[in-house]
Image (tube, rainbow, N blue to C red):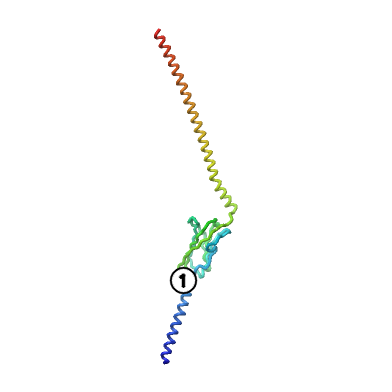
């Protein structure tokens, strides 16, 4: 009886120990996988101030080789100046504030246990334009108008030149016709005089 009871207790002890060990292992793996816990800007956020850096925060440590890349709404890649790996953070900096647009951030990290993780999120920049940006925009909008005016002026100049050439050609043609008529009249008169003299 005592022997049977001891076997039951031993089995329960082994089962409990295995469950505790399994739970500890799962908890460690979840912690070590360094899942994304937040970001600045946040997913879907509309940024209304100049933005020079993007920071991702993770639940655990991340290793060297982790990176982010950013693309605009047109699919053009944004040049990342520096990648900074901190204490559970990954920061990407850009040389100049991002212009107003929609952006997608793709991140790829190596977690503390060596497993790779990746993900993505989006945000929008809608910051007030600076005087320099407004001047560039105004200049860009005025440039087509200036080109159009220059083209129109060139067309008018070309038309005027063509008109002058046509008038000159017409005048030359008229002069040539007049000279030809005069020559024919002289020939006719000389021929007539010669004919009448010959008959006499």
User: How many other residues sit within 10 Å of disc 1, few (<14), some (14-19) or many (≥20)?
Assistant: some
Residue 146 appears left or right of 177? right
At 46% from the left and 71% from the top, the residue drawn is 113
Q: Is residue 65 visible from the viewing direction of this image?
A: no
x then y, percent, for residue 130: 59, 54
x then y, percent, for residue 116: 45, 67
Image height of 159 relative to 21, above or below: above
The image quarter in which residue 13 lies? bottom left
The image quarter in which residue 14 lies? bottom left
At 51% from the left and 35% from the top, the residue drawn is 159
**Extreme residue toward the left, this view:** 199
Quadrant in which the C terminus appears: top left
x then y, percent, for residue 170: 48, 27
Image height of 148 relative to 134, above or below: above
- The residue where tag 1 is placed is 113
Q: Is residue 156 visible from the viewing direction of this image?
A: yes
Quadrant in which the N terminus appears: bottom left
The image quarter in which residue 8 lies? bottom left
**Extreme residue toward the right, this view:** 131
x then y, percent, for residue 120: 49, 63
Q: Secondary structure at mark 1?
A: loop
**Extreme residue toward the top, this view:** 200
Image height of 22 relative to 191, above or below: below
């Amino acid at each position: 009886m005592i022997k049977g009871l001891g076997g039951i207790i031993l089995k329960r002890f082994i089962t409990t120990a295995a469950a505790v060990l399994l739970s500890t292992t799962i908890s460690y793996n979840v912690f070590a996988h360094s899942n994304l816990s937040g970001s600045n800007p946040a997913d879907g956020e509309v940024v209304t101030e100049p933005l020079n850096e993007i920071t991702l925060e993770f639940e655990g440590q991340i290793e060297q080789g982790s990176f982010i890349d950013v693309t605009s709404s047109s699919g053009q890649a944004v040049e990342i100046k520096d990648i900074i790996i901190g204490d559970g953070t990954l920061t990407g900096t850009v040389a100049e504030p991002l212009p107003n647009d929609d952006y997608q951030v793709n991140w790829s990290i190596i977690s503390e246990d060596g497993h790779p993780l990746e993900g993505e999120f989006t945000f929008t920049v809608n910051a007030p334009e600076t005087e320099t940006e407004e001047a560039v925009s105004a200049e860009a909008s005025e440039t087509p108008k200036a080109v159009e005016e220059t083209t129109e002026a060139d067309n008018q100049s070309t038309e005027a030149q063509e008109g002058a050439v046509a008038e000159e050609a017409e005048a030359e043609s008229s002069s040539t016709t007049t000279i030809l008529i005069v020559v024919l009249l002289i020939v006719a008169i000389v021929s007539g005089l010669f004919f009448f003299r010959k008959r006499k």
